[in-house]
Amino acid sequence: MDKIRIAILGFAREGHSVLKFIKKDAGYRNADIWVLDKNSKTEVPAGVNKVTGSGYLNPPAGGLSAFNVVFRTPGIPYLFPEIQKAKNAGAEISSVTSLFFERCPGTIVGITGTKGKGTVSTLLYKILKAGGKKVFLAGNIGKPALDVLPKMDKKSIAIFELSSFQLQDIKRSPSIAAVLDVFPDHLDAHKNINEYYEAKANIVRYQKRGDKTFFFKNIPLSRKVASKGNGRKIAVNEKTFRLFSPNDLAIKGLHNFKNAVMAAKIAESFGIPEEIILKSVRSFRGTEHRLEPVRKIIKNGNVITFYNDSASTNPQTAAAAIKAFPNEEKILIAGGQDKNLDYKPLSEALKNSKTELVVIFGENKNKIGGTIKASGVKIEFASALKNSVSTAYEAAEKLPVSSVVIFSPAATSFDMFKNYADRGEKFKKIVMGLIQ
């Protein structure tokens, strides 16, 4: 019998996790393993073949179609022609997510949405852990999913944050799914907006009737995505929720309150007592790079507070950041690499928002500037992040009242940074270096 041929497509965090897992798994014993990565400097362990650099999607002896299984990491689009050709030729296109769903012995709570996934996942993990559950945080945040798998049993709970890229090619759905706020995003990688929504819907598409789907009652696209599966639908309505209020949260914004309500309702379904939920919510300080308070500087008796919202990669999240401070004078720093998105939601949020200035940098600065000029807010362009922070700081110093400087880019980071976390870390370093 010929050896099974396996391609690991992308060799970053998930790729390393896949290799570690399949080397130990009896089902893949003696497999012919190849690592395919666009980074020409990628190194692999002894005994593993590799193709790196520009030809990584076309390995010798038949391309991707010559493999039995291709493990795709989320950063490599599922719709790439080479991947679709291999699929049509009979190759199994798999992923860490698919493998985890197949092998997980416990309960999977899958959480998707355009934004808010990390907040809900992290808060739910903290609540369930405080409630004595054997719970794991896996996927994009927490530990790599396959590293968690050996520690799990039937009583375990895995909270899995799921992006559209992770959901595109799965054939199983988690038994508990949460659909958060959904709006257009990643149109640089998806075929069109409908294909993006359909990818999101895979979180519920394969559910059984005994499964559960939580969704936001007041968000039409959340309802639409949730409706695609057979699980029991549980509408979450933050307007009628009474266990806690926005004032109980340490994190800013009504969007964060909604997400906390979602985490609380899922926790209730696991039988977690209200007092534990309330205590966990009140002590939650949010997640890094999501409206994260960085520094306060006092100038002439006024306080300038800097917030790092680098995880904001679309106009809706930047709009939410503006709305999170309805009574404060604001300066916004935005800009980055475009995803073929419309910036009108940000422009609308800026109108009558007490925003004194928007500083824009990055590849799409002209596109953002051209759209938000309709808001009437003053705009200044900068060449880099450091210049943007300096410009914002100088403007805040001149204001006669206390203010907030919000770094909420509304775009991806790949024009100047490794990722949004790298961008956020650099922002914080610049802010901490400002002279008071």
Image (cartoon, rainbow, N blue to C red):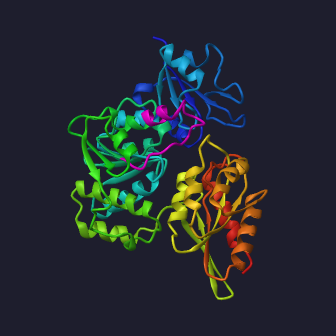
Indicate the quadrant containing the C terminus: top left, top right, bottom left or bottom right: bottom right
Predominant SS of the magenta segment: loop
Quarter where residue 322 is shown: bottom right
What residue appears at the point 41 percent right and 33 percent down from the top-left corner?
99
Is residue 29 shown left or right of residue 301? left
| Residue 3 appears in the rendering | no
The quadrant where residue 341 appears: top right
Magenta-colored stretch includes residue 87:
no
| Residue at 72 percent of width and 34 percent of height | 40
Inspect the magenta stretch and tell me whether residue 180 lies in it: yes
For the residue pair 156 and 173, the one nearer the viewer reads as 173
Q: Nearer the viewer, residue 169 or 247?
A: 247
Total residue callouts: 0
Side (left or right) of 61 relative to 253: right
**Residue 403 horizontal side relative to residue 159, left or right:** right
State left or right for residue 131 relative to residue 417.
left
On-image quarter of the N terminus: top left
Q: Which residues are magenta?
A: 179-199
* Residue 310 percent across, percent down from the top left: 60, 57
345 versus 73 height, above or below: below
Q: Which residue is depicted at the point 44% across and 51% down?
A: 117
Camera-side residue: 338 or 67? 338
On the image, the x and y values in percent for residue 340 come to 62, 40
Is residue 243 depicted above or below 175 in this figure? below
